[in-house]
Amino acid sequence: MQAPDNSSVARRAFLRYLAASPVCAALGLRPHALADWLAGAGSAAAPAGLQGPAPIQSPEQALSIMDFEAAARAALPPAHFGYMASGVDDDATLRANHEDFAKYRIRARRLIDVRRVDTSMELFGRRWPTPIVICPCGSQKAFHAQGELATARAARDGGNLQMLSGVSTTSVEDVNAARGEPVWYQLYPTNDVSVALAIVRRAAAAGCPVLVLTVDLNAGRNSETEQRAARLDTRDCRGCHTPGLTSSLRRKPMFDGQDLARVTSLAEPAMTWDYIARVRDAAPSMKIVLKGIVTREDAALSLRYGADAIVVSNHGGRAEESGRSSISCLPEVVAAVGRRVPVLLDGGIRRGTDVFKALALGARGVGIGRPYLWGLAAFGQRGVEAVLTMLRGELELVMRQAGTTTLASIGAAHVVRAVE
């Protein structure tokens, strides 16, 4: 084995020193894993002793979704990766989103003909070939030059339902063209309702059939990991990033032509349930989906105020530091809703088994965010396609293991909660 040179040893020693700092805890990494995070060596989520010597160099080399995380970390500047990776406060909710899937175990069944497996999902009268949904994630050109266009083309080729972020770096019209049909449009209300409703009308005019209203950020948030990662970035970012929300929104095409003088926030702390009616009046042709519902009380109110569907979500651990994962919230929301409207879930999906568990607990569709962004950052459209294909293949595998050949056959009897 060739000995490392002195500069490599010194650099590694410095990174080990940083690993003992509060940054390590803020990023949710094991001891010494911050050094790997900065160096782009292996996945910080990999089991101890199994971190690879270098990130994968092509999508075909990936053995699991987490291989794409390591590749994305190596491909991106620290500030950009930190923006993607960040939760809020100590990232406890972000970690719980995935870790809590382990609290549910799958009950395998035997001697069932599983030669043919149908993963198709029906939603609002439309059948999709897979229940794996592309969640709205903003600023995708910060991760790859093609941004949302690469994601849309991957969604087109995989037949995935796609939700477009209200702070995308590509217009809804261009995304629809790349997708080959209108996507679902996600709305941040902003503190200026006139701007929000103008954007809603634009999405409706573009043919978007569904508006996904995000309701989980109105209390504000503290993205500490994002801020710490930005401090590790030595680039001069002033050419792209100038102070103030207005400057940021001028780089978001959906805000083109809007008077941004009064827009000081993407959230609206004064928003109440009556906001749903205002949005519906602005675009009566669109279904209204509420994204960010996590309790039975709010699920019941969602029905009372006319929501057409619910997404159980805590914004990927980026909304509040409740410590409650999406999967732990799902059963009470499903129980409150019954079968009256569809319930979807996002947050923490890293395996096909995670998708299966969410479906068994009552989700109609299951959304992913960071995994496809990892693929996008590392390999563009090919990376997104590889992530979607891998998750769908893993879902089909576990469906066979559980003796379930359709999504409708997956139910609560197929999972059991582990004894804690």
Image (cartoon, rainbow, N blue to C red):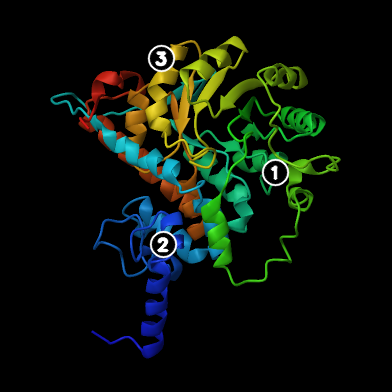
Q: Residue at x 79, y 40 (%)?
A: 263
Identify the residue under disc 3. 335
Q: Is residue 186 visible?
A: yes
For this orientation, the residue located farthest to the left is 111
Vertical placement of residue 311 versus 256, above or below: above
As measured in the structure, the alpha-carbon distance from the residue carrying label 2 to the one carrying label 1 is 28 Å
Image quadrant containing the C terminus: top left
The percent coordinates of residue 121 (x first, y second) are: 44, 25
Which residue is at a point 58% across and 24% down the rendered structure image?
290
x, y percentage for residue 235? 63, 71
Q: CA distance from mark 3 to mark 2?
A: 43 Å
Q: Which residue is mark 2?
A: 58
Q: Quadrant of residue 352?
A: top left
Inspect this view and state whether residue 182 appears: no
Q: Which mark is residue 174?
A: 1
Q: Is residue 33 left or right of residue 403?
A: right
Q: Quadrant of residue 213?
A: top right
Q: Say which element carries label 1.
A: helix
Work out whether mark 3 precedes mark 2 in sequence or the reverse, and give the earlier one. 2
Inter-mark Cα distance, 3 to 1: 39 Å
Q: Earlier in the sequence, mark 2 or mark 1?
A: 2
Q: Amino acid at mark 1?
A: Asp
Q: Residues within 10 Å of mark 1 (few under 14, many from 20)?
A: some
